[in-house]
Image (spheres, rainbow, N blue to C red):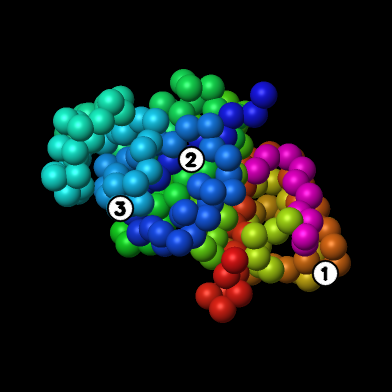
Amino acid sequence: MSKRIVIISGGELDEKFALSVLKESTAGCVIGVDKGMEFLYRNEIVPNYIVGDFDSVDQKIADYYRNETSVPIREYNPVKDASDTEIAVRLAMTLGCSELLILGATGGRLDHLWANVQILTIPFRAGIEAKILDPRNCIRLIGGTTVLKKAEMYGPYFSLFPLGKEVYGLNIQGARYPLRDHTLTPYDSLCVSNQLEGDEATISFSAGIVILMETCDKEEKR
């Protein structure tokens, strides 16, 4: 049975969008992460777990969850070896998630965004589908062969980036800018902002991990 877990992280959060995801996702579990607690508090949403070092959340809200609710809290020293979002991802995996949606992981500081993208490697290697979502972006990792269907895409554009190392034997079929047996390197922008030609496009490669971003412009956002 599928178990979808939603993580509310502490980055920039479009509240209308986040509420729509929570309403539509039928989440089996919600994990609040540090400043993400403020969104949950304002919208009277009781999470299943809270994690973080509480260095960026309003302390009155932190105290509310500590003292006035029975929500399990995993509080960590700010001097630690993993980010709050990584801790939440690992918790979700121990809870048996089969699908993971991460909100509040984009915007603001780019170092946090890039760390969050790299964190997707942890569930990916465990065979768990994980996505970072905001109103204009869906970010996930793919391996092997992936079929993009226009009716199911997050937006009209898709971009590919290698995670860590070169990606060999990359093929893109059914897109405006097709490729055949290409080596995707970490320092070129060849695979930015592609589009489907018809109803489907196929991405395949022989080795490596690819960051797939499905995106839309502001005026086209979902």
Q: How crowded is mark 3: few (under 14 residues within 10 Å), some or many (20 or more)?
A: few
- Looking at this view, is 166 or 216 the one in front? 216
Residue name at image x 39 percent, y 30 percent: 48
Choose mark 3 or mark 2, whichever is in front. 3
**Left or right of residue 128: residue 33:** left
- Looking at this view, is 172 or 80 the one in front? 80
**Left or right of residue 174: residue 69:** left
Amino acid on which disc 1 is placed? Glu
Q: Which mark is residue 44?
A: none
Q: Which mark is residue 6?
A: 2
Residue name at image x 38 percent, y 36 percent: 47
The residue tagged 3 is: 42
Quadrant in which the N terminus appears? top right
Q: How far apart are marks 3 and 2 (CA)?
A: 17 Å
Residue bounds of the magenta highlight: 142-151
**Left or right of residue 130: residue 14:** left
- Looking at this view, is 113 or 88 the one in front? 88
Quadrant in which the C terminus appears? bottom right
In this rendering, is residue 28 above or below 14? above
Q: Which residue lies furthest to the bottom in this view?
A: 219
Badge 3 element: helix
Badge 1 element: loop
- The first of marks 1 and 2 along the sequence is 2
Q: How crowded is mark 1: few (under 14 residues within 10 Å), some or many (20 or more)?
A: some
Q: Residue 197 carries which label?
A: 1
**Residue 150 among magenta residues:** yes
In this rendering, is residue 139 above or below 175? above
Choose mark 3 or mark 1, whichever is in front. 3
Q: Where is residue 165 in the image (x, y as percent from the top left)?
A: 55, 44
Q: Position of residue 146 (x, y in %)?
A: 75, 46
Residue name at image x 73 percent, y 56 percent: 152
